[in-house]
Image (cartoon, rainbow, N blue to C red):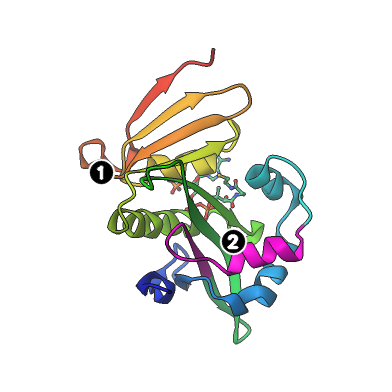
Amino acid sequence: MKNDISKYQVTEILRDQRPLIIRAVHPDDKGLIIDTIGRVGAESIYRRFFGPKKFTESDLKQATEVDFVNVVALVAVLEKDGKDHVAGGGRYVRIGGTGQTAEVAFLIEDAFQGLGIGSRLFKHLVSIGRDSGIARFEAEVLPSNEAMLRVFARGGVPVTRTMTRDSIHVVMDLKKKDDEHGDEGHFSETPCV
Ligand SMILES: CC(C)(COP(=O)(O)OP(=O)(O)OC[C@H]1O[C@@H](n2cnc3c(N)ncnc32)[C@H](O)[C@@H]1OP(=O)(O)O)[C@@H](O)C(=O)NCCC(=O)NCCS
């Protein structure tokens, strides 16, 4: 049974003053999402999936048909030429046995990066995650992905980064707010071993 998160919808104002709708993904977003993926550059795909990626029917189903319990997916929608335009999205997927940890990931199409969309998606996923009993978010981020690291650092939750062989493992503690460290986040870094 679908819960209220499946009806989640808020309006935000972007850095360039454009209104942005952040809402729960719907199964009938498949066409819009195929269009979005077609506009995302190879480098962004690499940063998201750590390699090239071909999208299959099953990937599309996974992207749009979520249960809003174990998987929560939000899309960022702008109006362009009078039509809905999905500029990207963010999701979390519960991992591990406790139900309190989720992996979080984002993909924003290149032309709309740097406008604050990723940061806003993250803020809403944190809020939904907290209300749904999630205590920590985790993410694997390429060391060169400064934009992603910055979104996490400024997200208002304490952040711990650990270097692994190829990526930075980021853990965000949703139980705490990071007011003390302003909007720059708090880092406890473990050096690469
Ligand atoms: C990473 C990503 C999700 C961020 O989303 P976004 O909408 O571009 O992010 P925002 O605009 O909210 O914020 C990006 C921040 O990084 C900064 N930034 C962008 N590029 C940067 C760079 N090369 N170096 C340093 N900082 C950078 C921006 O200035 C901004 O910081 P600010 O708020 O202090 O100005 C998006 O760029 C993306 O989809 N990238 C490709 C896929 C990807 O990397 N996914 C993450 C896998 S976990």
- Kindly report which numbered mark, 2 or 1, lies closer to the viewer in this rendering: 1
Structural distance between the alpha carbons of marks 2 and 1? 31 Å
Residue in the picture at 44% in, 65% down: 68
Which element is circle 1 on?
loop
Vertical order, 138 against 60 (above or below) = above
Choose the circle earlier in sequence order: 2 or 1.
2
Residue 88 rendering spot, x and y as whole percentages: 58, 62
**Residue toward you, 64 or 76:** 64
Left or right: where 14 falls relative to 184 = right
Q: Residues within 10 Å of mark 1 (few under 14, many from 20)?
A: few
Q: Residues within 10 Å of mark 2 (few under 14, many from 20)?
A: few
Residue in the picture at 41% in, 77% down: 7
**Residue toward you, 9 or 109:** 9
Location of residue 33 by image quarter: bottom right
Which quadrant does the N terminus fall into?
A: bottom left
Residue 138 rendering spot, x and y as whole percentages: 45, 40
Amino acid bearing label 1? Lys
For the record, the magenta segment spans 55-76
* Residue 123 in magenta stretch: no
Label 1 residue near ligand 1, CB within 8 Å: no
Vertical order, 178 against 165 (above or below) = below
Which element is circle 2 on?
helix
Label 2 residue near ligand 1, CB within 8 Å: yes
**Residue toward you, 134 or 172:** 134
Q: Which mark is residue 163?
A: none
Q: Which residue is mark 1?
A: 175
Residue 185 rendering spot, x and y as whole percentages: 33, 37
Q: Which residue is mark 2?
A: 112
Amino acid bearing label 2? Phe
Which quadrant does the C terminus fall into?
A: top right
Residue in the picture at 65% in, 56% down: 110
Left or right: where 69 falls relative to 81 = left
